[in-house]
Image (cartoon, grey):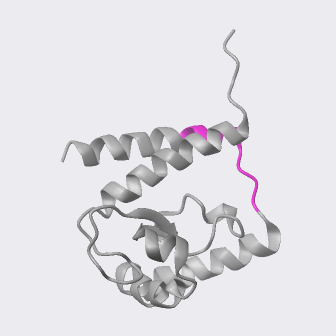
Amino acid sequence: MKKSKSLPKLKAELQRTFNEFIRLRDKGKPCISCGQSKDYLQAGHFYSVRMYDGLRFNEKNCHGECAGCNGFDDMHLLSYAANLIDRIGEYEYQMLKFQAEAYKKYGYKWSRLELIGLIEEYKEKVKLLKNN
C-alpha cells in the first residue's frame, strides 16, 4: 500500500509546479513591480502567502517579479498594484481584493483533493507552455 503525502508535502509540490507555471506564463514580460526586463523572474505574490494562504495559487495574485522587487524592496507593492490593474483589469483586481478580505477574515484550509487536483492542473499547464 502506497503511503499518501501529507498536506504540507502536497502544498510544497503544488507551490513548485505553480511557480514554474507563473515563470513560464510571464516569460518575456517585464517585472510587474519595476517594469524592468530580466532574464529570470520569480513568482511574486501581491497578497502574501503568509497572510493570505487562500490566494497562494491564484493566478491573478501571482506574477513574474524580479528578485530585487520580490525579496528586497518594501515599496514594490505600490507599483505592483498599479501594474496589476493594467494586467488583469479593474474588475478582476476588485474581485482579488474581495477574496483577500474574505480569506483574512475567515481563513482558508486546503483539502487533500483540492491540492492533488491543482497539482495535476498546473502540471498540464506547464506541459502546454513548454510545448509552445
Q: Quadrant of residue 83?
A: bottom left
Q: How many marks?
A: 0
Picture residue at 29% right of the left edge, 79% below the top: 36
**In which quarter of the view is residue 10 placed?**
top right
Left or right position of 130 against 47: left
Q: Residue at x 27, y 62 (%)?
A: 27
Residue shown at 27%/71% (left/top)? 29
Q: Nearer the viewer, residue 90 or 131?
A: 131
Q: Position of residue 15 (x, y in %)?
A: 55, 49
**Residue 39 appears in which quarter of the rendering?**
bottom left
> Farthest left residue?
132
Magenta segment, prevailing SS (helix, strand or loop): helix
**Residue 46 position in % (x across, y down):** 54, 75
**In-front residue for pair 69/8:** 69
Quarter of the picture containing the N terminus is top right
The magenta stretch is: 108-117
Residue 12 lies, with reference to residue 77, above or below; the image says above
61 in magenta: no
Q: Is residue 116 magenta?
A: yes
Give the side of residue 11 with respect to residue 28, left or right: right
- Furthest residue toward top: 1
Q: Position of residue 76 (x, y in %)?
A: 50, 84
Q: Is residue 66 left or right of residue 102?
A: left
Residue 48 is situated, as x and y percent measured from the top left of the image, at 63, 70
The residue drawn where x is 60% and y is 74% is 47
